[in-house]
Image: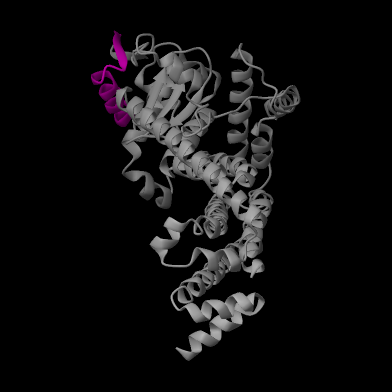
Amino acid sequence: MGISFYLPLAASVLLAVLAPPAGRRLPPRTAAWTLLTAAVVAAGAWATVLGMLGFTLVAQIPQVAAEGRWSPHLLAADTPVERPVAAACVLAVVVCTGALLLALWRGMRELAAAWRECRGLPDAGGLTVLDDPVPAAFALPGSPGRIVVSSGMLRVLPAGERHALLAHERAHLAHRHHVFLLVFRLSAALHPLLRPLMRSGGFALERWADEDAVAAVRDRATVARAIARAALASREARTRGLAATNGPVPERVTALLRPPARRRRDLVAVIACLAVVCCASLGQAADSLDRVFDSAAATAAPAPRLAVHKALPEEFHGAVHVERGSR
Amino acid sequence: MEPAAEGGRQGRRAPGKLEGEVLAALWAAGEPLGAGAVRDQLAGDPAYTTVLTILTRLHDKGLVTRQRSGRAHLYAPVRDAAGYAAAGMHDLLAQGGDRAAVLARFVSELSEEDERVLERLLRGSAAD
């Protein structure tokens, strides 16, 4: 009984652990979609299993049991989940749901702010230049989205590299990368083990935009130089804040100086298999939980059978099946 | 001329996209440019008249100033067309890329090691 609950949890954890290294070996576009799928499946299965395990305890509350028409005593006697485990799951579900709602609220508020800002900015074919010597560039999602670049950034880049920068930001907007980022963020809020996957996902999106820029300027080295120059210029100009973190910039540049990554169907297949196993085992877990509740409900009404089950707790499930067959 | 495949896809978007490229080129130059000089800065070899049309449109939008120079016009970007100083755009620029839902900056921060790697790369490519 226990195994059917823990299999989807195990698959979910495996997805969280294996998807980031797989993503690093895939072409960025494939990587982003693979990571997104892994994140959604892993977070969904994680939350559902915890919810199911926790519900075995919540369902023992008399009011809940009355609503669902099962016997709380039978359920308590027959639950496949230890009380402390179920209690921990209830707590985890509450905490994770809280984190999810908070992340959702923040994400939506930021997107709404970006949309408002987009409407107020002057537009030249989707580009807004801010007159500021500090080199900076980013894509602001909206309807339509905007590329925001400072004049300082435009002045440090030669023509070809400027073209690469604009193509990179345009790719972010065209492929709606902000939606990917939001989903990565929400899944990581729900399932803390997905945090490394969220970072890998963000990196895959940057690489995706880099490769789109390569398609636009038709030279990998130009895009690599644009990123390197922009990063160095930003660094020199930035006076506040510590740049202690090892940014993903050198990795992006290195990837651009190598030939493009080959398609790796095998890696995608492994992640897809894990996702399928995760979903299928989740269905099985739901099914077995359903049977527990069925038996608690079926035997709640007639008193004599209750006595039988109390006498033979370990054979309870066998008894339920016999009884079902006889009906 | 652009190859047909890409030309087809970009065909519809081309005017808007080019508008951004023209404005970016004017900002990058740091001095007023004629339409011909702007055209030299653009990828894909657009027609002179196209560039002129775009410059006129940018002028109509109030993003570009125009001054006569001999028989042609010179164009320069309007500083602070975004109302940058007034509208608190400093915040947008300062934290724009740090907000997670908004996309990350074009480049993130660097460690010293990163910096050395990148400088070597740029020096190497300049020597080519």
Residue B61 lies in the magenta stretch: yes
Q: Which residues are magenta?
A: B48-69
Kindly indicate the quadrant of the structure image that contains residue A188.
top right
Count of labels in the image = 0
Render colour scheme: one colour
Residue A259 lies in the magenta stretch: no
**Percent from the top left, x then y, of residue A244?**
70, 23
Q: Say if A151 sits above or below A70 in the image.
A: above
Does the rendering let one see residue B70?
A: no
**Percent from the top left, x then y, of residue A39?**
56, 51
Q: Which residue is depicted at the point 52% across and 39% down?
A: A99
> Where's the N terminus of chain B, which quadrant?
top left
Does the rendering let one see residue A165?
A: yes
Kindly indicate the quadrant of the structure image that contains residue A263.
bottom right
**Percent from the top left, x then y, of residue A184?**
53, 44
**Percent from the top left, x then y, of residue A238?**
60, 14
On screen, residue A58 versus residue A112, left or right, reads: right
> Where's the C terminus of chain B, which quadrant?
top right
Q: Which residue is depicted at the point 66% across and 17% down?
A: A242
Q: Which residue is depicted at the point 45% across and 16% down?
A: B91
